[in-house]
Image (tube, rainbow, N blue to C red):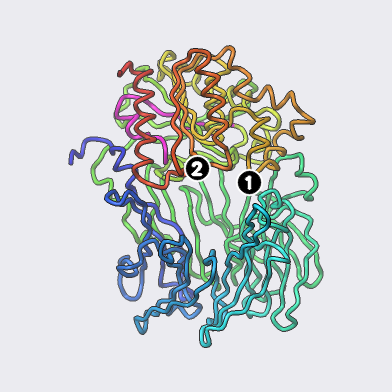
């Protein structure tokens, strides 16, 4: 292997991804899920890895842990529960491994499979969520219901029913007497804005709906004494967000008085609770291109525990004395940390290979709004050299690009290969991106496309003014909302030499009728198309087909319900009728994610070929 080259496409696709971190209550043991590529079977595989039990290293849980998920330690830290696939049924069963006796127990045989679970605080049982199908004429709805299984008798009790609601999240008080959960009337995504919080009492076997008139999201947790709950909630009442972009923070509700308050006022970003410990509430939030963790103490003081890097998962003990997290630093993939000490060596996979230099830059958009982005350049960039530039636009829009390696952010575009071929890469965090404050998050209200175009183009012009970019060799690509922005760049102007549209929206009016989240679109436009047709029209890439002139590669998942493939067909037909060089690839069986490494590599190779052809004249 040549150590003086950048990673190949196959090597980028093969980078390991860590997730689902969990820390034992004694603060000494860790379990997490590691995803890797199996090229022989053309599949991604997950294994559970553990750390602790006197071994100062991580080890695989067991040889047959392939594709197991959701490890969780028992309250006494001696057992690990996890989900294991049930043959070819694409469902999961619950297993428990005892480390003291080295035994494994198959706990459930739940029809429909298990989606998630939590240990009972006394360790004598497990709560789990499973789907129950309700078959209507031509339609099958899957309602998530809550169950409890006793570990001694293996008896199962159903606690909620599909006739009542669809379960979204749940948590259990430390004394095990009360369950709090978020539920919606139906599994329909449009009902997410109708979510409510309920509490269920073991002693009375009764549930109560709490008076919380907010949009709900994220996890929910009890205070240590069980008298309060903390959850993620919108800052205004539900009805406001029917026509406005959602913001959110954490909210605390007193179960005895019903009083609520939102205690975090000094963070201008969405905040989510991790766990309410004896030391206070651990929180996570994004600050520009960093994701931070902190502790909100009982006296209302917020202590920031990490400032730099991207925190991708956190687990703590109930006393708050031990903390474990996944963290990716600049130009790196995630490693596991325990009390600020790194315990995995995932980044050793790079060896002495070259890696792009990733830095955060900023510029002013046309209206003066400051925009940030991640600029990736060669390690030996030459000053005063005008490089060809490719722009990779993140999805969302309420998401962001970070200066790290992650399949979550860069899973379809081979940034390292672009760098090796002589490009530089810009990933703009355009208005509407998360982590830059509520005003920035909402700055794209009714200006989608038009304002995005200005944000992207002003970043290009800034790099041209710095002498870094050849203005005649600029291309843009993106997936989902990033694909929408790429499509808008392809039809609205003539500044780009080539474009790649991945899973992108092209006509907002038809997309509103076809997507599974029309309520989300309405929050950005203020009204449905029937009441606001002009805004839907001027922000749709398809509107500008008559003046389009940019060669365009179109990539789309065949079964994407979020952005249905009709968007791709409409753009393809419009560009082809204009005689513009256009290629379209519809990937069979794919929704948003490329679930096979071979498909992920193909998507990257198509993009590398397209931009090399048009920006480098590499035919």
Badge 2 or badge 1: first in the primary sequence: 1
Residue 288 placement, left or right of 208: left
- Is residue 47 one of those drawn in magenta? no
Provide the residue span drawn in magenta.
411-430
Dividing the picture into quadrants, the one containing residue 144 is bottom right
In the displayed structure, would residue 81 be above or below residue 564? below
Q: Position of residue 71 (x, y in %)?
A: 45, 67
| Residue most extreme to the bottom | 153
The disc label shown at residue 269, or none: 1
**Kind of element beneath mark 1:** loop
Within 10 Å of disc 1 (Cα), the crowding (few <14, some 14-19, many 20+) is many
Q: Residue 491 appears at what percent x and percent y?
A: 56, 18
Quadrant of res 52: bottom left
Q: Which residue is mark 2?
A: 592
Q: Which quadrant of the rendered structure holds the N terminus?
A: top left
- Disc 2 from disc 1: Cα separation: 26 Å
Q: Nearer the viewer, residue 211 or 376?
A: 211
* Up/down of 357 relative to 268, above or below: above
Within the image, what quadrant is residue 582 found in? top left
Residue 72 position (above or below residue 240): below
- Please state the total of marks drawn on the protein image: 2
């Amino acid at each position: 292997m040549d150590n003086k080259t950048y990673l190949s496409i196959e090597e980028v696709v093969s980078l390991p991804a860590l997730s689902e971190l969990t820390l034992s209550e004694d603060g000494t043991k860790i379990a997490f899920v590691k995803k890797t590529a199996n090229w022989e079977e053309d599949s991604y595989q997950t294994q559970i890895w553990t750390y602790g039990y006197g071994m100062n290293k991580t080890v695989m849980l067991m040889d047959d842990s392939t594709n197991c998920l959701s490890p969780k330690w028992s309250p006494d830290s001696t057992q690990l529960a996890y989900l294991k696939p049930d043959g070819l049924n694409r469902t999961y069963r619950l297993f428990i491994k005892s480390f003291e006796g080295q035994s494994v127990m198959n706990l459930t045989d739940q029809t429909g499979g298990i989606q998630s679970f939590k240990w009972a605080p006394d360790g004598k049982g497990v709560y789990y969520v499973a789907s129950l199908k309700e078959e209507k004429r031509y339609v099958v709805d899957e309602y998530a219901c809550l169950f409890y299984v006793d570990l001694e008798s293996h008896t199962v009790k159903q606690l909620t029913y599909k006739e009542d609601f669809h379960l979204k999240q749940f948590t259990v008080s430390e004394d095990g007497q009360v369950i709090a959960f978020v539920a919606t009337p139906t599994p329909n995504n449009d009902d997410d804005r109708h979510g409510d919080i309920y509490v269920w009492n073991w002693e009375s076997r009764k549930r109560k709906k709490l008076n919380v008139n907010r949009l709900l999201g994220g996890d929910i947790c009890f205070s240590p004494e069980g008298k309060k709950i903390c959850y993620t909630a919108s800052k205004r009442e539900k009805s406001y967000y029917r026509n406005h972009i959602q913001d959110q923070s954490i909210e605390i509700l007193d179960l005895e008085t019903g009083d609520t308050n939102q205690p975090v006022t000094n963070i201008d970003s969405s905040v989510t609770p991790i766990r309410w410990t004896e030391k206070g509430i651990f929180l996570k939030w994004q600050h520009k291109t960093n994701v931070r963790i902190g502790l909100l103490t009982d006296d209302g003081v917020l202590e920031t525990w990490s400032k730099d890097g991207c925190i991708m998962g956190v687990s703590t003990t109930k006393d708050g004395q031990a903390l474990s997290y996944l963290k990716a630093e600049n130009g790196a993939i995630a490693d596991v940390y325990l009390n600020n000490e790194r315990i995995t060596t995932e980044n050793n996979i790079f060896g002495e290979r070259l890696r792009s230099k990733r830095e955060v830059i900023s510029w002013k958009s046309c209206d003066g709004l400051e925009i940030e982005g991640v600029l990736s350049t060669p390690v030996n960039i030459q000053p005063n050299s005008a490089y060809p530039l490719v722009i990779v636009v993140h999805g969302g829009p309420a998401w962001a690009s970070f200066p790290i390696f992650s399949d979550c952010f860069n899973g379809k575009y081979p940034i390292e290969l672009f760098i090796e071929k002589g490009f530089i890469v810009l990933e703009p965090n355009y208005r509407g991106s998360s982590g830059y404050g509520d005003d920035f998050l909402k700055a794209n209200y009714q200006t989608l496309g038009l304002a995005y175009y200005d944000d992207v183009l002003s970043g290009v012009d800034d790099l041209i003014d710095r002498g870094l970019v050849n203005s005649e060799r600029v291309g843009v690509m993106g997936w989902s909302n990033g694909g929408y922005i790429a499509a808008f760049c392809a039809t609205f102007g003539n500044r780009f030499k080539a474009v790649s549209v991945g899973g992108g929206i092209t006509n907002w009016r038809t997309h509103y009728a076809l997507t599974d989240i029309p309520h989300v679109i309405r929050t950005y436009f203020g009204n449905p198309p029937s009441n606001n047709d002009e805004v839907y029209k001027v922000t749709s890439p398809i509107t500008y087909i008559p003046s389009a002139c940019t060669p365009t590669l179109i990539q789309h998942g065949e079964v994407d319900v979020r952005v249905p493939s009709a968007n791709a067909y409409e753009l393809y037909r419009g560009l082809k009728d204009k005689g513009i060089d256009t290629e379209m690839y519809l990937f069979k069986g794919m929704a948003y994610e490329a679930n096979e490494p071979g498909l992920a590599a193909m998507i990257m190779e198509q993009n590398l070929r397209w931009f090399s052809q048009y920006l480098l004249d590499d035919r």
